[in-house]
Image (tube, helix red, strand yellow):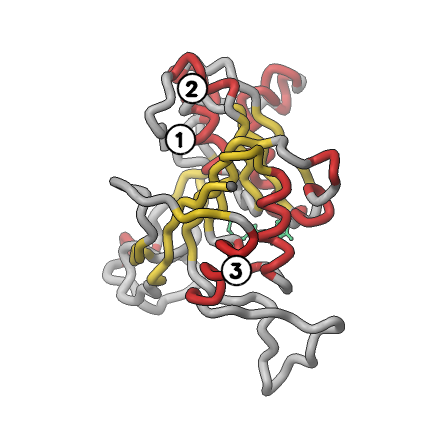
Amino acid sequence: MSFNVLSNCRAEIRVLIPGAGLGRIVYDVLRAGYEVQGNELEFCMLMASNLALNMYLLQTRLSTNFRLDPERAYELYPYIHTMSHHRSTQDVVRCVSIPDTSAGKGMRLSGTKAEMSMVAGDFIDCYSSPSDAGTFSVVITIFFIDTAPNVLQYLETIYNVLEPNGVWINIGPLAWHFEPDSESTPPRTGGTIELTLEELLSATQKIGFVLETGENLTQKSISMPYMGNNRGLLTYLYHTEFWVARKT
Ligand SMILES: C[S@@+](CC[C@H](N)C(=O)[O-])C[C@H]1O[C@@H](n2cnc3c(N)ncnc32)[C@H](O)[C@@H]1O
């Protein structure tokens, strides 16, 4: 992630993370010293990321009775509701801490002076205007681009917000969220566009990106689970695609 950027220059580099979800990558990029803006559509995600990211800040503002302990995470038991795919009783009743690290402590240790913000709303609505053009050096999309009904609009929006020579980093599958299910879902008004990886990369280059090559940059497949139970007997594995593309 560092791209050999000197740590004292990183706060001047603006990174945008659309589809930020629970905000973990926002936090990691901030801790690395970059100025970062997350963007998220769903309120449930925004509420959860607000809780995780602002826990430390909140406790200094709330009255004593309602204070959260910034060094202590919430304890959840997400596996107690089903009995399938477990190896042991201990696995069923095990606790998961949210967040898995203290945001406040992490920030203090990192010593970052960079700023973080979160924009609520649809990525295209929030970043397609001429006033958004060239406002970010880097866009990072993780398990995001396949959430588009029309991925070409996502590509255009990413291109719009990047400054010349800006970089788009992507990792994720192509599980097109709006692809009509011929059995049950009526077609979406206005239609949808689903592309193969080959078609998507071709469109990316036609819009004006150049795929970067070099150590750790070349487009490649990386297999990984997503939201799975890492101790369970069942794992869905995505053969995700990673690439770094530069705006020309
Ligand atoms: C599969 S999740 C990935 C979340 C996160 N990037 C991660 O890796 O954990 C996709 C996220 O994109 C958000 N999303 C979907 N469509 C969006 C849109 N048009 N604008 C902004 N966020 C969107 C969803 O609410 C969801 O949080």
Percent of width and height locating residue 6: 37, 17
At horizontal 47% and vertical 38% (from top left) the residue drawn is 167
Residue corresponding to mark 3: 203
Ligand 1 within 8 angstroms of badge 1 C-beta: no
Percent of width and height locating residue 19: 57, 47
Please tell me whether mark 1 or mark 3 is closer to you in this view. Answer: 3
Percent of width and height locating residue 40: 62, 44
Q: Amino acid at mark 3?
A: Ala
Q: Secondary structure at mark 3?
A: helix
Ligand 1 within 8 angstroms of badge 3 C-beta: no
Q: Amino acid at mark 1?
A: Thr
Q: CA distance from mark 2 to mark 3?
A: 42 Å
At horizontal 44% and vertical 45% (from top left) the residue drawn is 245
Q: Amino acid at mark 2?
A: Lys
Give the camera-side residue of 54 and 193: 193
Residue corresponding to mark 2: 105
Q: Which mark is residue 101?
A: 1
